[in-house]
Image (spheres, coloured by chain):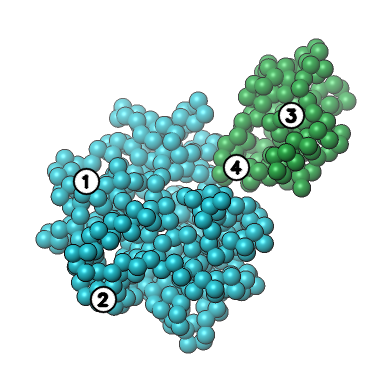
Chain colours: A cyan, B green
Amino acid sequence: MGKRTVLFPLHQELGARIVDFGGWDMPVQYSSQIGEHHAVRRAAGVFDVSHMCVVDLRGARVRTFLGQLLANDVGKLTTPGKALYSCMLNEQGGVLDDLIVYYLTDSWFRAVVNAGTRDKDLAWMRRHAAASGVEVSERTDLAMLAVQGPEARAKAAQLLAPGDAAAALALGSFFGRELSGWFVARTGYTGEDGFEIMLPAAAAIPAWRQLNSLGVASCGLGARDTLRLEAGMNLYGNDMDESKQPFESNLGWSVALEPPGRAFIGRAALEALGARGSRAKLVGLVLEDRGVLRSHQKVIAPAVGEGEITSGTFAPTLERSIALARVPAATGAAVQVEVRGKLLNARVVRPPFVRLGKSLIG
Amino acid sequence: MSNVPADLKYTKSHEWVRTLANGTLEIGITDHAQHALGDLVFVEVPEAGRAVKAGEQCAVVESVKAASDVYAPLDGEITAGNPRLADAPETVNAEPYAAGWLMRLKPNPGALAAADLMSAADYHQLLDAEGD
Protein backbone atom coordinates (compact mmCIF):
# COMPACT_ATOMS: atom_id res chain seq x y z
CA MET A 1 0.00 0.00 0.00
CA GLY A 2 1.26 3.42 -0.93
CA LYS A 3 0.89 6.73 0.83
CA ARG A 4 -2.60 8.20 0.70
CA THR A 5 -3.96 11.71 0.75
CA VAL A 6 -6.80 12.71 3.05
CA LEU A 7 -9.15 12.47 0.04
CA PHE A 8 -8.41 8.78 -0.62
CA PRO A 9 -11.69 7.45 0.88
CA LEU A 10 -13.65 9.85 -1.30
CA HIS A 11 -11.78 8.75 -4.44
CA GLN A 12 -12.76 5.18 -3.64
CA GLU A 13 -16.36 6.16 -2.97
CA LEU A 14 -16.46 7.98 -6.33
CA GLY A 15 -15.27 4.82 -8.09
CA ALA A 16 -11.86 6.11 -9.12
CA ARG A 17 -9.32 3.76 -10.56
CA ILE A 18 -6.33 4.00 -8.22
CA VAL A 19 -2.74 3.73 -9.43
CA ASP A 20 0.67 4.10 -7.87
CA PHE A 21 2.15 7.52 -8.59
CA GLY A 22 5.59 7.98 -7.08
CA GLY A 23 4.69 5.93 -4.02
CA TRP A 24 1.21 7.45 -3.66
CA ASP A 25 -2.12 5.69 -4.25
CA MET A 26 -3.76 8.28 -6.50
CA PRO A 27 -6.88 8.41 -8.73
CA VAL A 28 -5.93 8.13 -12.40
CA GLN A 29 -9.51 8.50 -13.61
CA TYR A 30 -13.07 8.43 -12.28
CA SER A 31 -15.02 7.60 -15.43
CA SER A 32 -13.46 8.63 -18.75
CA GLN A 33 -10.03 10.22 -18.92
CA ILE A 34 -10.97 12.05 -22.12
CA GLY A 35 -14.26 13.20 -20.58
CA GLU A 36 -12.38 14.61 -17.58
CA HIS A 37 -9.94 16.36 -19.91
CA HIS A 38 -12.77 18.02 -21.84
CA ALA A 39 -14.52 19.03 -18.60
CA VAL A 40 -11.46 21.11 -17.71
CA ARG A 41 -11.07 22.66 -21.18
CA ARG A 42 -14.79 23.46 -21.47
CA ALA A 43 -16.10 24.01 -17.90
CA ALA A 44 -14.35 23.03 -14.66
CA GLY A 45 -12.68 20.08 -12.98
CA VAL A 46 -11.11 19.39 -9.60
CA PHE A 47 -7.90 17.43 -8.96
CA ASP A 48 -6.46 16.09 -5.72
CA VAL A 49 -2.88 17.37 -5.65
CA SER A 50 -2.44 16.88 -1.91
CA HIS A 51 0.49 14.55 -2.61
CA MET A 52 2.52 17.59 -3.60
CA CYS A 53 4.70 19.08 -0.91
CA VAL A 54 3.93 22.51 0.56
CA VAL A 55 6.96 24.01 2.29
CA ASP A 56 6.96 27.18 4.35
CA LEU A 57 10.24 29.06 4.48
CA ARG A 58 10.50 31.56 7.33
CA GLY A 59 13.25 33.83 8.53
CA ALA A 60 14.53 37.39 8.28
CA ARG A 61 16.97 36.34 5.50
CA VAL A 62 14.59 34.15 3.52
CA ARG A 63 14.82 36.30 0.39
CA THR A 64 18.61 36.08 0.37
CA PHE A 65 18.39 32.31 0.89
CA LEU A 66 16.00 31.85 -2.05
CA GLY A 67 18.21 34.07 -4.17
CA GLN A 68 20.93 31.43 -3.75
CA LEU A 69 18.64 28.40 -3.90
CA LEU A 70 16.65 29.14 -7.06
CA ALA A 71 17.63 29.70 -10.69
CA ASN A 72 14.83 32.22 -11.16
CA ASP A 73 15.17 35.45 -9.20
CA VAL A 74 12.86 36.01 -6.23
CA GLY A 75 13.94 39.64 -6.54
CA LYS A 76 11.21 39.81 -9.21
CA LEU A 77 8.65 39.26 -6.44
CA THR A 78 7.84 42.76 -5.19
CA THR A 79 4.11 42.46 -4.42
CA PRO A 80 3.00 40.19 -1.57
CA GLY A 81 1.14 37.14 -2.90
CA LYS A 82 3.02 37.03 -6.20
CA ALA A 83 4.24 33.60 -7.36
CA LEU A 84 7.32 32.62 -9.35
CA TYR A 85 8.10 29.42 -11.26
CA SER A 86 11.68 28.27 -10.85
CA CYS A 87 14.08 25.41 -11.19
CA MET A 88 16.17 24.39 -8.21
CA LEU A 89 19.56 23.32 -9.56
CA ASN A 90 22.45 21.30 -8.28
CA GLU A 91 26.02 22.56 -8.55
CA GLN A 92 26.31 20.99 -12.01
CA GLY A 93 23.31 22.95 -13.26
CA GLY A 94 21.09 19.86 -13.31
CA VAL A 95 17.44 20.28 -12.38
CA LEU A 96 16.82 18.96 -8.85
CA ASP A 97 13.19 19.99 -9.12
CA ASP A 98 10.86 22.61 -10.50
CA LEU A 99 8.64 24.49 -8.09
CA ILE A 100 6.43 27.48 -7.48
CA VAL A 101 7.34 29.91 -4.75
CA TYR A 102 4.96 32.52 -3.31
CA TYR A 103 6.11 35.73 -1.66
CA LEU A 104 3.85 36.18 1.36
CA THR A 105 5.78 38.50 3.68
CA ASP A 106 9.41 39.60 3.87
CA SER A 107 10.04 36.79 6.34
CA TRP A 108 7.72 34.15 4.87
CA PHE A 109 7.75 32.48 1.45
CA ARG A 110 5.86 29.32 0.52
CA ALA A 111 7.12 26.77 -2.01
CA VAL A 112 5.22 23.90 -3.63
CA VAL A 113 7.48 21.09 -4.83
CA ASN A 114 6.85 17.76 -6.51
CA ALA A 115 5.70 14.73 -4.53
CA GLY A 116 8.34 12.38 -5.90
CA THR A 117 11.21 14.71 -4.94
CA ARG A 118 9.90 15.66 -1.49
CA ASP A 119 12.62 14.08 0.66
CA LYS A 120 15.46 15.13 -1.60
CA ASP A 121 14.14 18.70 -1.85
CA LEU A 122 13.59 19.12 1.89
CA ALA A 123 17.07 17.82 2.66
CA TRP A 124 18.61 20.13 0.03
CA MET A 125 16.67 23.16 1.28
CA ARG A 126 17.54 22.47 4.91
CA ARG A 127 21.18 21.96 4.10
CA HIS A 128 21.41 25.35 2.42
CA ALA A 129 19.00 27.14 4.79
CA ALA A 130 21.12 26.55 7.86
CA ALA A 131 23.60 29.32 7.07
CA SER A 132 20.87 31.96 6.70
CA GLY A 133 18.84 30.77 9.68
CA VAL A 134 15.78 30.06 7.55
CA GLU A 135 13.31 27.57 8.97
CA VAL A 136 12.06 24.95 6.46
CA SER A 137 8.75 23.37 7.50
CA GLU A 138 6.61 20.98 5.50
CA ARG A 139 2.89 21.72 5.80
CA THR A 140 1.54 18.19 6.11
CA ASP A 141 -1.55 19.65 7.79
CA LEU A 142 -2.75 21.02 4.44
CA ALA A 143 -4.56 19.32 1.59
CA MET A 144 -4.41 20.81 -1.89
CA LEU A 145 -7.08 20.95 -4.59
CA ALA A 146 -6.57 22.25 -8.11
CA VAL A 147 -9.82 23.61 -9.55
CA GLN A 148 -9.22 24.32 -13.23
CA GLY A 149 -11.16 25.40 -16.29
CA PRO A 150 -12.96 28.45 -17.69
CA GLU A 151 -15.67 28.17 -15.02
CA ALA A 152 -13.34 27.09 -12.20
CA ARG A 153 -12.81 30.39 -10.41
CA ALA A 154 -16.49 31.30 -10.31
CA LYS A 155 -17.39 27.83 -8.99
CA ALA A 156 -14.57 27.60 -6.47
CA ALA A 157 -15.31 31.07 -5.11
CA GLN A 158 -18.66 29.69 -3.94
CA LEU A 159 -16.78 27.63 -1.34
CA LEU A 160 -15.71 30.86 0.36
CA ALA A 161 -17.47 33.41 2.56
CA PRO A 162 -18.67 36.38 0.47
CA GLY A 163 -15.83 38.73 1.43
CA ASP A 164 -13.21 36.05 0.81
CA ALA A 165 -14.83 35.10 -2.49
CA ALA A 166 -14.54 38.66 -3.74
CA ALA A 167 -10.90 38.76 -2.71
CA ALA A 168 -10.20 35.42 -4.43
CA LEU A 169 -11.88 36.53 -7.64
CA ALA A 170 -9.79 39.72 -7.58
CA LEU A 171 -6.51 37.76 -7.59
CA GLY A 172 -4.35 38.42 -10.60
CA SER A 173 -2.75 35.61 -12.56
CA PHE A 174 0.04 33.94 -10.55
CA PHE A 175 -1.04 35.55 -7.29
CA GLY A 176 -2.20 33.85 -4.10
CA ARG A 177 -3.39 34.93 -0.69
CA GLU A 178 -4.55 33.50 2.58
CA LEU A 179 -8.29 33.80 3.19
CA SER A 180 -9.67 32.62 6.54
CA GLY A 181 -7.09 29.85 6.82
CA TRP A 182 -7.29 28.73 3.18
CA PHE A 183 -4.55 29.69 0.75
CA VAL A 184 -6.07 30.42 -2.66
CA ALA A 185 -3.76 30.91 -5.66
CA ARG A 186 -4.52 31.63 -9.29
CA THR A 187 -2.12 29.02 -10.61
CA GLY A 188 -2.36 25.61 -12.23
CA TYR A 189 -0.93 22.91 -14.45
CA THR A 190 -3.52 22.66 -17.20
CA GLY A 191 -3.20 25.74 -19.42
CA GLU A 192 -6.59 26.94 -18.17
CA ASP A 193 -7.55 29.59 -15.67
CA GLY A 194 -8.33 28.38 -12.16
CA PHE A 195 -7.24 28.13 -8.58
CA GLU A 196 -4.99 25.93 -6.56
CA ILE A 197 -6.32 25.85 -3.01
CA MET A 198 -4.38 24.76 0.05
CA LEU A 199 -6.77 24.10 2.89
CA PRO A 200 -6.87 22.31 6.25
CA ALA A 201 -6.97 18.57 5.61
CA ALA A 202 -10.31 18.15 7.38
CA ALA A 203 -11.96 20.61 4.98
CA ALA A 204 -10.87 18.82 1.81
CA ILE A 205 -13.61 16.20 1.44
CA PRO A 206 -16.50 18.61 2.14
CA ALA A 207 -14.97 21.10 -0.32
CA TRP A 208 -14.68 18.42 -3.02
CA ARG A 209 -18.29 17.32 -2.52
CA GLN A 210 -19.48 20.91 -2.73
CA LEU A 211 -17.52 21.44 -5.95
CA ASN A 212 -19.14 18.29 -7.39
CA SER A 213 -22.56 19.62 -6.43
CA LEU A 214 -21.72 22.85 -8.29
CA GLY A 215 -21.01 20.84 -11.42
CA VAL A 216 -17.21 20.65 -11.12
CA ALA A 217 -16.07 17.27 -12.46
CA SER A 218 -13.80 14.98 -10.42
CA CYS A 219 -10.62 14.59 -12.48
CA GLY A 220 -7.74 12.15 -12.13
CA LEU A 221 -4.03 12.22 -12.84
CA GLY A 222 -4.64 10.84 -16.34
CA ALA A 223 -6.46 14.00 -17.44
CA ARG A 224 -3.93 16.10 -15.52
CA ASP A 225 -1.18 14.60 -17.68
CA THR A 226 -2.89 15.19 -21.04
CA LEU A 227 -3.84 18.73 -19.99
CA ARG A 228 -0.33 19.66 -18.88
CA LEU A 229 1.21 18.19 -22.00
CA GLU A 230 -1.17 20.13 -24.26
CA ALA A 231 -0.23 23.20 -22.17
CA GLY A 232 3.44 22.47 -22.93
CA MET A 233 4.36 22.09 -19.29
CA ASN A 234 7.20 19.77 -18.31
CA LEU A 235 6.76 16.88 -15.91
CA TYR A 236 9.69 16.44 -13.56
CA GLY A 237 11.30 13.03 -13.98
CA ASN A 238 10.02 12.71 -17.57
CA ASP A 239 11.00 15.90 -19.34
CA MET A 240 13.86 16.96 -17.08
CA ASP A 241 15.84 15.61 -14.17
CA GLU A 242 19.17 16.06 -12.41
CA SER A 243 21.09 15.02 -15.52
CA LYS A 244 19.56 17.84 -17.62
CA GLN A 245 20.01 21.56 -17.31
CA PRO A 246 17.22 24.10 -17.92
CA PHE A 247 18.48 25.24 -21.32
CA GLU A 248 18.06 21.73 -22.74
CA SER A 249 14.66 21.41 -21.04
CA ASN A 250 12.85 24.41 -22.60
CA LEU A 251 13.17 26.15 -19.23
CA GLY A 252 15.86 28.69 -20.11
CA TRP A 253 13.19 31.42 -19.79
CA SER A 254 13.02 30.67 -16.07
CA VAL A 255 16.74 31.11 -15.44
CA ALA A 256 17.52 34.68 -14.34
CA LEU A 257 21.13 35.48 -15.28
CA GLU A 258 20.46 39.14 -14.42
CA PRO A 259 21.58 40.58 -12.11
CA PRO A 260 25.02 39.10 -12.84
CA GLY A 261 26.07 39.23 -9.20
CA ARG A 262 23.40 36.81 -7.94
CA ALA A 263 25.35 33.64 -7.16
CA PHE A 264 22.63 30.98 -7.31
CA ILE A 265 23.51 27.31 -7.06
CA GLY A 266 24.31 25.97 -10.53
CA ARG A 267 25.03 29.37 -12.04
CA ALA A 268 28.73 28.74 -12.62
CA ALA A 269 27.99 25.44 -14.37
CA LEU A 270 25.35 27.03 -16.61
CA GLU A 271 27.67 29.88 -17.55
CA ALA A 272 30.41 27.42 -18.45
CA LEU A 273 27.93 25.51 -20.63
CA GLY A 274 26.58 28.74 -22.06
CA ALA A 275 29.85 29.52 -23.78
CA ARG A 276 29.58 26.28 -25.76
CA GLY A 277 25.80 26.36 -26.12
CA SER A 278 23.39 23.56 -25.38
CA ARG A 279 23.77 20.52 -27.56
CA ALA A 280 20.17 19.50 -27.09
CA LYS A 281 16.81 21.21 -26.86
CA LEU A 282 13.34 20.18 -25.73
CA VAL A 283 10.74 20.77 -28.43
CA GLY A 284 7.11 20.00 -29.12
CA LEU A 285 6.11 17.41 -31.72
CA VAL A 286 2.81 17.08 -33.54
CA LEU A 287 2.32 13.71 -35.20
CA GLU A 288 1.28 14.09 -38.83
CA ASP A 289 0.55 10.38 -39.35
CA ARG A 290 -1.87 8.18 -37.46
CA GLY A 291 -0.65 6.66 -34.20
CA VAL A 292 0.31 7.70 -30.70
CA LEU A 293 3.65 9.12 -29.56
CA ARG A 294 4.94 7.72 -26.26
CA SER A 295 7.87 8.50 -24.01
CA HIS A 296 11.22 6.89 -24.94
CA GLN A 297 10.41 6.50 -28.63
CA LYS A 298 13.35 7.37 -30.86
CA VAL A 299 13.25 10.65 -32.79
CA ILE A 300 15.23 10.96 -36.01
CA ALA A 301 16.21 14.45 -37.15
CA PRO A 302 17.28 14.04 -40.79
CA ALA A 303 20.97 14.81 -41.35
CA VAL A 304 21.28 16.02 -37.76
CA GLY A 305 21.03 13.10 -35.39
CA GLU A 306 18.72 11.36 -32.99
CA GLY A 307 16.69 12.28 -29.96
CA GLU A 308 14.03 10.83 -27.73
CA ILE A 309 10.45 11.56 -26.75
CA THR A 310 10.23 12.51 -23.08
CA SER A 311 6.42 12.69 -22.83
CA GLY A 312 3.89 11.67 -25.45
CA THR A 313 0.18 11.15 -25.58
CA PHE A 314 -3.00 11.50 -27.56
CA ALA A 315 -4.15 15.10 -27.12
CA PRO A 316 -7.93 15.09 -26.66
CA THR A 317 -8.36 18.78 -27.48
CA LEU A 318 -6.38 18.44 -30.72
CA GLU A 319 -7.58 14.90 -31.55
CA ARG A 320 -4.06 13.92 -32.57
CA SER A 321 -0.88 12.83 -30.88
CA ILE A 322 1.63 15.30 -29.45
CA ALA A 323 4.87 14.98 -27.52
CA LEU A 324 7.78 16.72 -25.92
CA ALA A 325 11.09 15.47 -27.24
CA ARG A 326 14.74 16.14 -26.51
CA VAL A 327 16.52 16.49 -29.84
CA PRO A 328 19.84 17.83 -31.14
CA ALA A 329 19.98 21.63 -31.02
CA ALA A 330 20.21 21.87 -34.84
CA THR A 331 16.98 19.92 -35.42
CA GLY A 332 14.77 21.59 -38.01
CA ALA A 333 11.03 21.71 -38.63
CA ALA A 334 10.37 18.05 -39.41
CA VAL A 335 11.42 14.80 -37.79
CA GLN A 336 10.51 11.14 -37.87
CA VAL A 337 9.59 9.06 -34.85
CA GLU A 338 10.06 5.32 -34.60
CA VAL A 339 6.68 4.04 -33.43
CA ARG A 340 6.30 0.29 -33.06
CA GLY A 341 8.80 -0.46 -35.80
CA LYS A 342 7.54 2.17 -38.26
CA LEU A 343 8.83 5.65 -39.02
CA LEU A 344 6.09 8.24 -38.66
CA ASN A 345 6.31 11.92 -39.60
CA ALA A 346 6.09 14.65 -36.99
CA ARG A 347 6.25 18.42 -37.12
CA VAL A 348 8.43 20.32 -34.66
CA VAL A 349 6.58 23.09 -32.84
CA ARG A 350 7.20 25.35 -29.93
CA PRO A 351 5.03 24.45 -26.92
CA PRO A 352 2.37 25.16 -25.69
CA PHE A 353 0.02 23.27 -27.99
CA VAL A 354 -3.18 24.52 -26.32
CA ARG A 355 -3.84 27.60 -24.23
CA LEU A 356 -7.17 28.59 -22.68
CA GLY A 357 -9.09 26.02 -24.67
CA LYS A 358 -7.64 27.06 -28.04
CA SER A 359 -5.28 25.15 -30.31
CA LEU A 360 -2.03 26.99 -30.99
CA ILE A 361 -0.57 24.57 -33.51
CA GLY A 362 -2.51 25.60 -36.65
CA MET B 1 -18.31 -6.62 -13.28
CA SER B 2 -17.43 -7.23 -16.90
CA ASN B 3 -19.87 -8.38 -19.52
CA VAL B 4 -18.93 -11.88 -20.77
CA PRO B 5 -21.40 -13.14 -23.43
CA ALA B 6 -22.07 -16.86 -23.05
CA ASP B 7 -22.00 -17.63 -26.78
CA LEU B 8 -18.37 -16.55 -27.39
CA LYS B 9 -14.98 -18.18 -26.85
CA TYR B 10 -12.13 -16.38 -25.08
CA THR B 11 -8.34 -16.25 -24.84
CA LYS B 12 -6.10 -15.70 -21.85
CA SER B 13 -4.96 -12.45 -23.46
CA HIS B 14 -8.55 -11.10 -23.38
CA GLU B 15 -9.64 -11.56 -26.98
CA TRP B 16 -13.06 -12.96 -27.83
CA VAL B 17 -13.86 -15.22 -30.81
CA ARG B 18 -17.23 -15.57 -32.53
CA THR B 19 -17.94 -18.18 -35.21
CA LEU B 20 -19.93 -16.59 -38.03
CA ALA B 21 -22.41 -18.52 -40.21
CA ASN B 22 -19.87 -19.03 -43.02
CA GLY B 23 -17.26 -20.48 -40.65
CA THR B 24 -15.20 -17.30 -40.55
CA LEU B 25 -14.19 -16.12 -37.07
CA GLU B 26 -14.80 -12.62 -35.79
CA ILE B 27 -12.33 -11.44 -33.17
CA GLY B 28 -12.26 -8.53 -30.78
CA ILE B 29 -11.14 -7.56 -27.28
CA THR B 30 -13.32 -8.23 -24.26
CA ASP B 31 -15.29 -5.76 -22.20
CA HIS B 32 -12.78 -6.33 -19.41
CA ALA B 33 -9.90 -5.46 -21.76
CA GLN B 34 -11.47 -2.27 -23.13
CA HIS B 35 -12.32 -1.15 -19.61
CA ALA B 36 -8.81 -1.81 -18.36
CA LEU B 37 -7.31 0.16 -21.27
CA GLY B 38 -9.66 3.12 -20.93
CA ASP B 39 -10.63 5.48 -23.75
CA LEU B 40 -9.23 4.09 -27.00
CA VAL B 41 -7.75 6.68 -29.35
CA PHE B 42 -6.00 4.60 -32.01
CA VAL B 43 -6.62 1.13 -33.40
CA GLU B 44 -4.56 -0.57 -36.09
CA VAL B 45 -6.12 -3.65 -37.65
CA PRO B 46 -4.50 -6.17 -40.02
CA GLU B 47 -4.90 -6.13 -43.80
CA ALA B 48 -7.09 -8.71 -45.49
CA GLY B 49 -5.04 -11.55 -46.95
CA ARG B 50 -2.41 -11.63 -44.22
CA ALA B 51 -1.62 -15.13 -42.95
CA VAL B 52 -1.28 -15.27 -39.17
CA LYS B 53 -0.15 -17.85 -36.64
CA ALA B 54 -1.71 -18.44 -33.23
CA GLY B 55 -0.16 -16.04 -30.74
CA GLU B 56 1.12 -13.67 -33.44
CA GLN B 57 0.69 -9.97 -32.79
CA CYS B 58 -1.71 -8.72 -35.45
CA ALA B 59 -3.50 -5.61 -34.18
CA VAL B 60 -2.79 -2.73 -31.82
CA VAL B 61 -5.22 -0.93 -29.56
CA GLU B 62 -4.01 2.27 -27.95
CA SER B 63 -5.70 4.23 -25.21
CA VAL B 64 -4.66 7.63 -23.93
CA LYS B 65 -2.54 5.80 -21.38
CA ALA B 66 -0.98 2.85 -23.17
CA ALA B 67 -0.58 0.69 -26.25
CA SER B 68 -1.61 -2.96 -26.16
CA ASP B 69 -1.04 -5.74 -28.65
CA VAL B 70 -3.81 -7.99 -29.87
CA TYR B 71 -2.89 -11.55 -30.82
CA ALA B 72 -4.29 -13.99 -33.35
CA PRO B 73 -6.01 -16.74 -31.34
CA LEU B 74 -5.32 -19.38 -33.99
CA ASP B 75 -3.71 -20.01 -37.38
CA GLY B 76 -5.52 -18.63 -40.40
CA GLU B 77 -5.88 -15.86 -42.94
CA ILE B 78 -7.27 -12.42 -42.21
CA THR B 79 -10.34 -11.74 -44.32
CA ALA B 80 -11.07 -8.25 -42.99
CA GLY B 81 -10.01 -5.62 -40.51
CA ASN B 82 -12.83 -3.48 -39.13
CA PRO B 83 -12.69 -0.38 -41.34
CA ARG B 84 -14.67 1.91 -39.02
CA LEU B 85 -12.08 1.80 -36.24
CA ALA B 86 -9.62 4.05 -38.09
CA ASP B 87 -11.92 7.02 -37.55
CA ALA B 88 -13.90 5.77 -34.56
CA PRO B 89 -11.65 3.76 -32.22
CA GLU B 90 -14.04 4.56 -29.36
CA THR B 91 -16.44 2.03 -30.92
CA VAL B 92 -14.37 -0.66 -29.18
CA ASN B 93 -15.17 0.94 -25.80
CA ALA B 94 -18.84 1.37 -26.59
CA GLU B 95 -19.55 -1.99 -28.26
CA PRO B 96 -16.65 -4.38 -27.70
CA TYR B 97 -18.66 -7.45 -28.78
CA ALA B 98 -20.54 -5.93 -31.73
CA ALA B 99 -19.56 -2.93 -33.89
CA GLY B 100 -16.16 -2.81 -32.15
CA TRP B 101 -14.89 -6.10 -33.57
CA LEU B 102 -11.27 -5.89 -34.76
CA MET B 103 -10.77 -8.50 -37.46
CA ARG B 104 -12.22 -11.51 -39.25
CA LEU B 105 -10.15 -14.58 -39.86
CA LYS B 106 -10.62 -17.75 -41.89
CA PRO B 107 -9.11 -20.51 -39.77
CA ASN B 108 -6.73 -23.02 -41.31
CA PRO B 109 -8.12 -26.59 -41.44
CA GLY B 110 -8.15 -28.03 -37.93
CA ALA B 111 -6.95 -24.75 -36.35
CA LEU B 112 -10.18 -24.05 -34.49
CA ALA B 113 -10.21 -27.49 -32.86
CA ALA B 114 -6.55 -27.12 -31.90
CA ALA B 115 -6.90 -23.59 -30.53
CA ASP B 116 -6.50 -22.88 -26.82
CA LEU B 117 -9.85 -21.15 -26.26
CA MET B 118 -11.94 -20.83 -23.13
CA SER B 119 -15.67 -20.96 -22.53
CA ALA B 120 -17.42 -17.93 -21.04
CA ALA B 121 -17.52 -19.69 -17.66
CA ASP B 122 -13.78 -20.33 -17.72
CA TYR B 123 -13.08 -16.74 -18.80
CA HIS B 124 -15.22 -15.51 -15.92
CA GLN B 125 -13.02 -17.59 -13.59
CA LEU B 126 -9.89 -16.09 -15.12
CA LEU B 127 -11.22 -12.58 -14.48
CA ASP B 128 -12.12 -13.50 -10.91
CA ALA B 129 -8.60 -14.81 -10.41
CA GLU B 130 -7.21 -11.54 -11.80
CA GLY B 131 -9.34 -9.64 -9.32
CA ASP B 132 -11.87 -8.09 -11.70
Q: Is residue A152 left or right of residue A283?
A: right
Q: Which mark is residue B53?
A: none
Say which chain tag 1 marks.
A
Task: From the top left corner, tell me how far across and down residue B87 is, in percent.
Answer: 64, 40
Disc 1 crowd, CA 10 A, few/some/many (<14, 14-19, 20+):
some
Q: Nearer the viewer, mark 3 or mark 2?
A: 2
Q: Are marks 3 and 4 on the same chain?
A: yes
Separation of marks 2 and 4 at Cα, in angstroms:
48 Å
Q: Is residue A236 visible?
A: yes
Q: Report which residue position mark 2 lands on.
A: A107
The numbered disc on residue B11 is 3
Mark 1 element type = loop
**Nearer mark to the viewer, of 2 and 4:** 2
Query: How far apart, in angstroms, are the residues tagged by discs 1 and 3?
Result: 52 Å
For disc 2, the chain is: A
Q: Residue at x 28, y 56 (%)?
A: A124
> Where does the image place residue B123, in percent across and percent down from the top left?
78, 34
Q: Is residue B121 left or right of residue A257?
A: right
Q: Mark 1 belongs to which amino acid?
A: Gln
The alpha-carbon separation of the residues under discs 1 and 2 comes to 29 Å
Quadrant in which residue B70 is drawn: top right
The residue under label 1 is: A92
Specify which label sits upstream in the sequence, 3 or 4. 3
Confirm or deny contact between disc 2 and disc 4 (CB under 8 A).
no
For the residues bearing labels 3 and 2, Cβ distance under 8 angstroms = no
Q: Classify mark 4: residues with Cα within 10 Å, few (<14), some (14-19) or many (20+).
A: many
Q: Give the residue type that dot 3 points to.
A: Thr
Q: Secondary structure at mark 4?
A: strand
